[in-house]
Image (tube, helix red, strand yellow):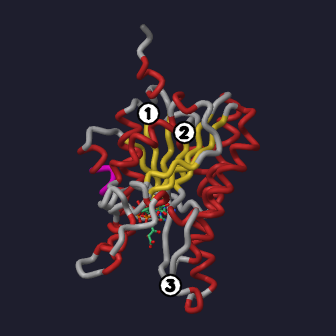
Amino acid sequence: MTDYLQQFSLQGKVALVTGAAYGIGFAIAKAFAQAGARIAFNCRSQAHLDKALADYKAAGITARGYICDVTDEKQVQALVAAIEKDLGVIDILVNNAGIIKRIPMCEMQVEDFRQVVDIDLNAPFIVSKAVLPGMIKKGHGKIINICSMMSELGRETVSAYAAAKGGLKMLTRNIASEYGAANIQCNGIGPGYIATPQTAPLRQPGNPFNAFILAKTPANRWGTPADLEGPAVFLASEASNFVNGHILYVDGGILAYIGKQP
Ligand code: NAP
Ligand code: GCO
């Protein structure tokens, strides 16, 4: 009997996970390594990079780290060239790097709006455009865009983030449409509310948002980065070769639930 689980293996693959110094990206990159992939990651801060390399090493993972701002096309092109030289042509890209600014729209400066859209939407375009030629030449590729609940829902103070993540959902579908014939699958992961530095302000003791999210989540808990590892390995592996343009929500059921009665 063939080894059924082999279809989930990432053995021999080169994966780039952007913004994987910590948080969700770190967990996904770690899972990819444990599934056999060679890992490249980037971030903007040397201090974050140095700590991340130590953290990957502590997890038994040899990851290649690079300083690169994903909004800068020349830096991204140099990043992809360096990874191809160090590890080989990129088979798997996870557009994970992202920021959020929680400001009421009428108080938000346009520069703040532009920065969120630049990192959360324009950068996935830039990085995907940089890796697609290698994937096309190789005859296969996987692109995974980290979307959000805000790809489907709005809420106060996150107008820029919701606009960007809504756009990222449609960029995902368009890459799937345009490059499916080249055997490239582009899908999204839509995490629910995950305990990372990005959501730390929402989880401060006494912040009513914490109870709010627990009431909106059937699982009645915040997600952890580890909850995203299996879904990410699935979408990066041959097991998902006929899954294309799909946003896989990993949210504990938030999108299915009206919320716990007070
Ligand atoms: P995080 O803890 O804030 O980590 C963000 C990562 O992105 C960091 O490594 C950061 O490193 C990097 N980064 C930010 N801007 C960058 C840029 N311009 N160029 C390169 N790297 C950059 O965030 P997270 O919670 O892990 O979230 C990761 C992704 O999941 C984001 O796209 C986020 O929108 C999405 N998401 C998060 C949640 C959640 O509840 N946490 C839910 C749904 C979706 P440097 O600052 O050192 O550059
Ligand atoms: C917020 C949160 C969310 C999460 C995530 C939910 O302020 O509402 O930061 O946006 O980060 O995107 O899926």
Q: Residue 71, position in %: x, y?
A: 60, 64
Mark with earlier residue (1, 2): 1
Magenta part of the chain: 50-54
Is disc 1 surrounded by few (<14), some (14 to 19) or many (20+) residues within 10 Å?
many
Q: Residue 72, position in %: x, y?
A: 62, 63
Mark with earlier residue (3, 1): 1
Q: Residue furthest front?
A: 261
The residue that mark 1 highlights is 37
Along the line of sight, which residue is nearer the eye, 8 or 41? 8
- Find numbered disc 1 in the image and state the secondary structure of the residue it sits on: loop
Q: Amino acid at mark 3?
A: Ile
Tell which tag, 3 or 1, sits nearer the viewer.
3
- Find numbered disc 3 in the image and state the secondary structure of the residue it sits on: loop
Q: Amino acid at mark 2?
A: Ile
The residue that mark 2 highlights is 92
Q: In the rendered image, which quarter contains the C terminus?
A: bottom left
Q: Vertical placement of 2 versus 181: above or below?
A: above
Is disc 2 surrounded by few (<14), some (14 to 19) or many (20+) residues within 10 Å?
many
